[in-house]
Image: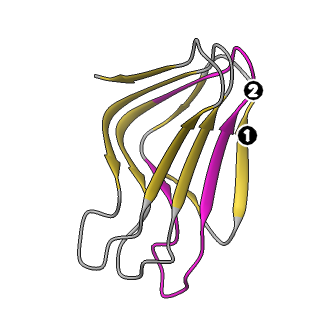
């Protein structure tokens, strides 16, 4: 199932077997809002399709991913910054060593 994180919300991955079809961080609608994904130690998320960190259409539609020790993210593709006109910035933070980002 597609997952959209927006409107200033933060979602925390706290299990080691989370999955979704696609993931977009930052508003895709007419509003300007952020979306944040965080991980706890040892947690993992597999996204079968694309991840977009930061949407498009307005520079305020930002996305952020924050890792902690030994967390893992696997995706079909990862785009940082919106893929179309007026892209919003995307940020990926690794707060401790040992986290992994895997692009299948």
Q: Please give the residue where the numbered disc 2 appears in the rendered image.
A: 40
The percent coordinates of residue 71 (x first, y second) are 62, 19
Residue at the image position 58 percent from the left and 11 percent from the top: 98
Residue that protrudes farthest toward the left in the picture: 84
Q: What's the magenta region?
A: 23-46
The percent coordinates of residue 87 (x first, y second) are 33, 71
Q: Can you see residue 6?
A: yes
Residue that protrudes farthest toward the front in the picture: 96
Residue at the image position 70 percent from the left and 14 percent from the top: 42
Q: Quadrant of the C terminus?
A: top left
Q: Can you see residue 1?
A: no
Residue 31 vertical placement versus 56 (above, below):
below
Q: Secondary structure at mark 2?
A: loop
Residue 12's mark?
Answer: 1
Residue 25's mark?
Answer: none
In this rendering, would 60 be left or right of 55?
A: right
Residue at the image position 41 percent from the left and 82 percent from the top: 58
Q: Is residue 38 magenta?
A: yes
Mark 2 crowd level (few <14, some 14–19, many ≥20, 10 Å Cα): some
Mark 1 crowd level (few <14, some 14–19, many ≥20, 10 Å Cα): few
Residue at mark 2 to residue at mark 1: CA–CA distance? 7 Å
Q: Nearer the viewer, residue 43 or 95?
A: 95
Tags 2 and 1 touching, CB below 8 Å = yes
The image quadrant that residue 83 belongs to is bottom left
Residue at the image position 51 percent from the left and 66 percent from the top: 62
Specify how the rendered protein is coloured: secondary structure
The image quadrant that residue 88 belongs to is bottom left
């Amino acid at each position: 199932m597609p997952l959209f994180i927006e409107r200033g919300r933060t979602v925390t991955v706290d299990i080691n077997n989370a999955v979704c079809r696609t993931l977009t961080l930052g508003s895709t609608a007419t509003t300007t809002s952020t979306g944040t994904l965080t991980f706890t130690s040892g947690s993992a998320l597999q996204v079968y399709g694309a991840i977009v960190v930061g949407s498009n259409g307005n520079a305020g539609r930002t996305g952020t991913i924050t890792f902690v020790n030994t967390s893992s993210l696997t995706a079909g593709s990862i785009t940082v910054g919106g893929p179309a006109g007026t892209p919003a910035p995307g940020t990926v933070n690794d707060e401790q060593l040992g986290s992994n980002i895997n692009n299948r």
